[in-house]
Image (cartoon, rainbow, N blue to C red):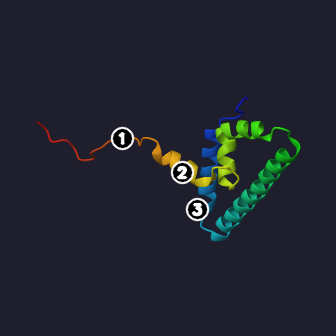
Amino acid sequence: MADGPNLRLTSDRIDALVDELTSVPDRRVATKVEELLSLLLELQGVALGRIVEVVDRVTPDASEVFGRILDDDLLSSLLRLHGLHPDGLTAGMEEALAAPAPVPVAVSLKPRAKA
């Protein structure tokens, strides 16, 4: 299945827009942006829940369909976000914590002494 637009770029752009809109001096704008995002996420969660229910009711082998959905990183993360993933939110967090951490690189901002 094609991924469509670059999801990382889309996500980064959303983050940038939210940061920009929530940092305007007029706090009312930031409050409206936060409310809008909250309502969109709520609507998305309810819609995903209904999709899960419909697939479960009308698909003879729903486990195969759900297996494919759970194998998709984007869909699986959306289900986790909305509390619909069978493993729950904690399994994803445990996987992330179990992954090897990047090795920090020390950078010195002090000028080097001349030899």
Query: Residue 103 got which mark?
Result: 1
Give the number of the mark in front: 3 or 2: 2
Residue located at (33% from left, 41% from top):
105
Image quarter of the N terminus: top right
Secondary structure of residue under mark 1: loop
Locate residue 21: give its quadrant.
bottom right
Earlier residue among tags 3 and 2: 3
Q: Is residue 58 visible?
A: yes
Q: For the residue marked with disc 2, what is the amino acid? A: Met
**Residue furthest toward the right?**
58
Earlier residue among tags 1 and 2: 2
Compared to 7, does 15 lie above or below?
A: below
Of residues 2 and 17, the one nearer the viewer is 2
Residue under numbered circle 2:
93
Secondary structure of residue under mark 3: loop
Residue located at (40% from left, 41% from top):
102
Compared to 41, does 25 lie above or below?
A: below
**Residue furthest toward the left?**
115
Residue under numbered circle 3:
23
Q: For the residue marked with disc 1, what is the amino acid? A: Val
Image quarter of the C terminus: top left
Compared to 25, does 110 lie above or below?
A: above
Q: For the residue marked with disc 3, what is the amino acid? A: Ser
Label 3 environment density (alpha carbons within 10 Å; few <14, some 14–19, many ≥20): few
Give the number of the mark in front: 3 or 1: 1
Label 1 environment density (alpha carbons within 10 Å; few <14, some 14–19, many ≥20): few
